[in-house]
Amino acid sequence: MYKLKIPQDMIGTLIGPGGKTVRRIQDEAGGATIDIQEDGTVIVGSPNEEVARKAIRMIEGLTKEVQVGEIYTGKVTRLLNFGAFVEILGPARKALVHISQLGADHVRNVEDEVKVGDEVHRHGLRDRQPRPHQHSPAAPSSSANRPSRRPRRPATAPATAAARGGSGAKTAPCSAGV
């Protein structure tokens, strides 16, 4: 029997919808038993040590956090015109490999470099701070940086020529020779 600890927020990921993920791990590992406790403790058992170790690798792959700079091997699952989605650390984790990272030179088409099912190596994503949402308290409102507007004058009817003291005739510029 082996005992490992996973983050409590990953328990649902390990169990899967209706226990589907944990059953798949048990089957694919070759019959290991997996007991998950509420504190994140996972007990893996099997009479065959290789079966237990395979189940542990699958659990760690599913619950491990992606580390910046670490290299992962994954399978291409989907192609888009700007890159390819690669399954890393199990089926629950997919990463986008941008078209600019697929080849040493300029790549015109993703299909020229990879196909669905190909194995590729992928570096851990660079650490990026998420952008605050427009309406979150952390995001400054767009009106905070804008100077206040002057109040608009109420709309009035346009003054007529007669009211201005004119004859009411419209004038237009004329060209010479008419």
Image (tube, rainbow, N blue to C red):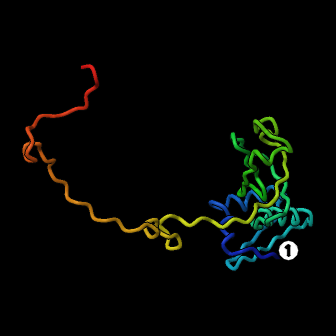
Residue farthest toward the front in the current orientation of the protein: 177
Would you identify the image quadrant in which residue 116 lies? top right
Disc 1 marks a residue whose amino acid type is Tyr
Relative to 174, does residue 12 appear above or below in the rendering? below
Kindly identify the residue that appears in the image at 19 percent across and 58 percent down. Answer: 154
Comparing 8 with 94, the one in front is: 94
Kindly identify the residue that appears in the image at 69 percent across and 69 percent down. Answer: 10
Comparing 141 with 70, the one in front is: 141
Would you identify the image quadrant in which residue 57 lies? bottom right
In the figure, is residue 70 to the left or right of 129?
right
Relative to 178, does residue 31 appear above or below in the rendering? below
Kindly identify the residue that appears in the image at 41 percent across and 68 percent down. Answer: 147
**Which x, y percent locates residue 111?**
77, 36
**Which x, y percent locates residue 156?**
16, 53
Q: Tag 1's secondary structure?
A: strand
**Which x, y percent locates residue 45?**
84, 70
Quickly name the residue at label 1. 2
In the figure, is residue 48 to the left or right of 19?
right
Kindly identify the residue that appears in the image at 76 percent across and 60 percent down. Answer: 125
Count numbered badges in the picture.
1
Relative to 18, does residue 103 appear above or below in the rendering? above
Comparing 146 with 48, the one in front is: 146
Residue farthest toward the top in the current orientation of the protein: 177
Q: Residues within 10 Å of mark 1 (few under 14, many from 20)?
A: few
Would you identify the image quadrant in which residue 9 lies? bottom right
Residue farthest toward the bottom in the current orientation of the protein: 39
Relative to 171, does residue 47 appear above or below in the rendering? below
Quarter placement of the C terminus: top left
Comparing 62 with 87, the one in front is: 87
**Which x, y percent locates residue 72?**
84, 57
